[in-house]
Amino acid sequence: MRASEFYSERFHEHRPVHTHLPRKARTPLRILKFGGTSVGDASSIEKVVAIIRAAAQESHVAVVVSAMSGVTNKLIEAATHSEAGDYKLASTILEELRKQHEAVASALIHSAMARNCIDRKIQQLFQEADALCQDTILLRESTLRARDSISSLGERLSAPLVAAALAARGGARQSVAPLEIVVPASCPGAAEPVMARTRERCNADVHPLLRQGIVPVLTGFIGATADGVVTTLGRNGSDYSATILGSALDADEVIIWSDVDGVLTVDPRLVSGVRRIPEISYREAAELAYFGAKVLHPKTLRPLIQSGIPIWIRNTFAPERPGTKITPTVSPNGGGVKALTAIADAALITVGGPGMLGVPDVLGRTFKTTAAVQANVLLSSQSSSQNDICLVVSSAVAERTVEALRREFAQDLVHEKAEHITLDPNVAIVALVGENMRGVSGILARTFGALDRDNLNIIAIAQGSSGCSISFVVARKDMKATLTTTHQELQLGAPYPQALPAASD
Ligand code: ADP
Ligand code: ASP
Ligand code: MG
């Protein structure tokens, strides 16, 4: 496949060439990130290799890979069995995973020497996994650090596989650079990068490879403290790795290769008749990701804000299609809502009722309590009398948040018989996202009218002050129907409107 088949001249419009390379070698640098489905089996990895090779004809390329799809889940399952003391179940999972990786290696790599090398690597990583599970069984609990070490093995396996497949088809100019993003010490679970240190490490370990025309294949998802303790960036975090590295390496573009044609008007698994959005702003993409659109990790845009590096979402399985371009700003399309998204596993907590009248500082105490139990409030709304607040949190933290709130207000409500802090565990958040929604009248009226017509009830509503999203709470059983009705009513599946000329005043 030739580069020009799927890299258009648009690429060359952007940003100066890569600043850390000597001027004569200043070829643009692209970060190509491949998700779990893109590296999910041997035939998908073949497609990945073709994409990397084509890109490497045009620019410097650094590759970031996820674990093969499903592998991180299975590794976490093995860790959970180990915590329960069940070595047999844990080792069965590891054995299946080992066979899966060996089968992919044997389908992709034919030279005896290269095969031997990758087999040894696979064997070494599974010995490490086994030792981690055995340690966990001995302790009968796994520390977050041990869990991170086990769950990060998926990327440590897929990166050498992809690099070996690439080397097998493109000569010896590829290498695996097991570069971990530098994170603060003692920060397991969902660590944040220390950009200055990550940049130093990129300068030391990655730039020299790029200068030699080598394609480094880097592990997504993984971080490590400066002294080498492994951690992860949180589930689905390889997108975040790609943009952290894009920023640290001063890349010209980050391209996230996935199994969809780009950012779509809604998750195609939930609604039919969806459409690709050609261009979307950082803010819109961040808002979509925050409200559950799995196509991007919620923090993906953060590292790019200062530099404004463009990011693309493209389809590994249809690389000739243009994808979605995400840039700091986009021209207004006049359409208002661009996309819908939903968080299915949410719970609604209500703090209120007449019994709360006269209770001092309900709002302040409520949010202090949610912060104390580390419950991220996804949406909140409050009645004007200040004694009726509703909060939506993820299902995982709902019970502990309600318990903490009941403790907080126990003394105030000691003589009250009625329940004033209630939990509905079966709700979902649906969000409408679009940068210029505020300027378009009637969006809510149309949406609510259509939902009412289809007997879909809205429990609570909130509008972000940025005007970039409107979110509402519905019963979980109504989530899909709410998305379908709204998508239809707002005609999001219709051909994309032409950009409007800038308004003249
Ligand atoms: P990867 O393995 O490449 O990281 P993910 O499964 O994490 O891929 O994300 C891609 C999935 O995100 C798609 O298959 C799609 O079902 C889902 N998705 C949710 N919302 C959207 C959206 N608005 N546009 C595109 N995909 C979406
Ligand atoms: N492999 C990790 C996960 O499944 C990271 C990723 O795929 O982005 O969460
Ligand atoms: Mg993903």
Image: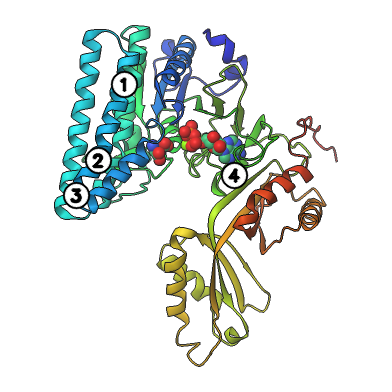
N-terminal-most mark, 2 or 4: 2
**Comparing labels 3 and 1, the label whose residue is closer to the camera:** 1
Which mark, residue 288? 4
| Amino acid on which the number 3 mark rests in the picture | Thr
Residue position marked by numbered label 2 in the rendering: 226
Q: Residue at x 42, y 25 (%)?
A: 39
N-terminal-most mark, 4 or 3: 3
Q: Tell me the distance, in whole angstroms, between the alpha carbons under discs 1 and 2.
A: 35 Å
Q: Tags 3 and 2 in contact by the CB under 8 Å rule?
A: no
Closer-to-camera residue (74/464): 74
Q: Let me know if residue 22 appears in the view.
A: yes
Residue position marked by numbered label 1 in the rendering: 103
Q: Tell me the distance, in whole angstroms, between the alpha carbons under discs 3 and 1.
A: 28 Å
Give the image location of residue 52, x and y in percent.
45, 16
- Secondary element at tag 1: helix
Give the image location of residue 44, x and y in percent.
45, 21
Q: Tags 3 and 1 in contact by the CB under 8 Å rule?
A: no
Give the image location of residue 108, x and y in percent.
35, 14
Residue position marked by numbered label 3 in the rendering: 136
Q: Residue at x 74, y 48 (%)?
A: 485
| Amino acid on which the number 4 mark rests in the picture | Leu
